[in-house]
Amino acid sequence: MCVTCFSRFHRGLGGVDQRQVSAGRRKLLAGFSAALLFGSLGAKSQAQSAPPKIENKLSPDQALERLMAGNARYVRGDTSKKDFATSRAALSEGQNPYACLLSCADSRVGPEFCFDESRGDLFVTRVAGNYVNVDILGSLEYAVAVLGAPLIMVLGHSRCGAVSAAISAYEKNTDYPGHIQSLATAIVPAVQAASRQPGNLSLLERATEENVRLNVQRLATATPILRQRVETGALKVVGGIYQLDTGQVMLLS
């Protein structure tokens, strides 16, 4: 695909047609309203009773601190023992995750593992290239607005194949079969921005970081549901890079 064609794929949010975003959001909010009316989301019952995991009631800063402490244990090889049987009954009645992840779909990156967490702790969304689309956005809006999660982390990783594909599309006009092209196209803005940045890092490293930063910005500003919570301090959106060689997650400023 030629570079001049990329703009056609980047209307509105990160390559998603804004009309699709608006229509999807209307459907999502309508679904929220109906579900809340009939109690199917369980938000009212959860508010009236103790949450399944009391320890998950955290501020955004506390949530980030816990997330990074879990990663430190993972890097040391000192992960905690998981007792799935004990939590099964409580989690069957609801959930209150303390953090959301937008992670790459790479099989080597498992958020529950690399943050040493158990079921019910993390609300994980995944797509190759860890970029925001309508489905990801709706899922994270649900986690924040209904489940009350105070933290979102966009998690990229070293040597990301999706970012490499976007670099090839940008530099060589590479065309990919099927829907793979849409993945590469969505990440091209990060490659374009990274190609103009000075520094000693490779283009792949710079583009991987820039892709995370762009999607952090999108999530923090894209919709009233998320933006208003960020502005009031009820929600924090951060970015990180998972290092395949060490398992360490490096927070991006």
Image: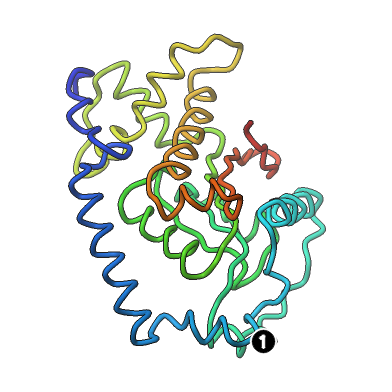
The residue pinned by badge 1 equals: 85
- Answer with left or right where residue 215 lies relative to residue 156: left
Q: Secondary structure at mark 1?
A: helix
Residue that lies at the very extreme toward the bottom in this rendered image: 89
Q: Position of residue 161 (x, y in %)?
A: 43, 36
Q: Position of residue 12 (x, y in %)?
A: 26, 37
- Asked which quadrant contains residue 48, the reply is bottom right
132, 236: nearer the viewer: 236
Q: Amino acid at mark 1?
A: Ala
- Answer with left or right where residue 226 lies relative to residue 67: left
Q: Is residue 180 above or below residue 206?
A: below
- Asked which quadrant contains residue 151, the reply is bottom right
Residue that appears at 62% across and 68% down: 121
Q: Residues within 10 Å of mark 1 (few under 14, many from 20)?
A: few
Residue that appears at 55% across and 66% down: 148
**Which quadrant is the N terminus positioned in?**
top left
42, 116: nearer the viewer: 42
Task: Give the colouring mode of the picture.
Answer: rainbow
Q: Is residue 52 above or below residue 163?
A: below
Residue that appears at 70% across and 60% down: 116
Q: Position of residue 2 (x, y in %)?
A: 19, 19
